[in-house]
Image: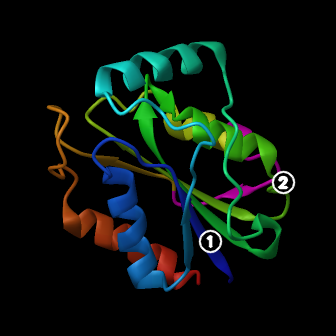
Amino acid sequence: MKTLIVYYSWHNGNTKRIAEMIQKELNADITAIDTLTPYPAVYRQASDQGKREVETGYCPALKPLPFEVREYDRIIIGTPTWWYTMAPAVRTFLTENDFSGKTVVPFMTNAGWPGTVIQDMCELAEGAEIRFPKEIRFDSDGGDRLVTGLSEIDRWIDELKKES
């Protein structure tokens, strides 16, 4: 099964960290989703902008990816939690691509408030078979300390490897 890992990561790089763990084990193609217009470097400003975007369902323009989604059988998609749902950049990615006949593996990182991220991602991945959705928790003080056990993450990645 030809696999592409696509993720959006911003502040602490937690989602990127998980995506790279998956990539190391699956030896799959990997790429970050990047907005055409960067978010402010100041956390509070970016957070306020992200909240407004989530509340309005805004889909920011994205930089082109180096891979064509249509060429892959399985797409593993990672997002941090932004105001109880996916990051707006991931919303754009999901709405701009056709997942018909593909397997989608959604994963999300959060600091203890998972909201409806996985459900929202699944709804936007129309036509896809959803497999092995995963919530991965980091510390709640805005850091990069993993709370979900590494053994749990390893078991999840092992399940993904079995389907490769």
Kindly identify which numbered label has been placed on residue 4.
Answer: 1
Identity of the amino acid at label 1? Leu
Residue stretch rendered in magenta on the structure: 123-132
Pick whichever, 134 or 35, lies toward us: 35
Residue at x 17%, y 41% (from the top left corner): 143
Pick whichever, 139 or 58, lies toward us: 58
* Quadrant holding the C terminus: bottom right
x, y (%) of residue 56? Answer: 64, 13
Residue at x 70%, y 38% (from the top left corner): 61
Q: In this view, does 137 lie to the left or right of 50?
A: left
x, y (%) of residue 5? Answer: 56, 67
Identity of the amino acid at label 2? Asp
Between the residue at mark 2 and the residue at mark 1, the CA separation in whole angstroms equals 14 Å
Disc 2 designates what residue?
A: 98
**Around disc 1, counting alpha carbons within 10 Å, would you say few (fewer than 14), some (14 to 19), or many (20 or more)?**
many
x, y (%) of residue 81? Answer: 42, 35
* Quadrant holding the N terminus: bottom right
Q: Is residue 153 left or right of residue 22?
A: left
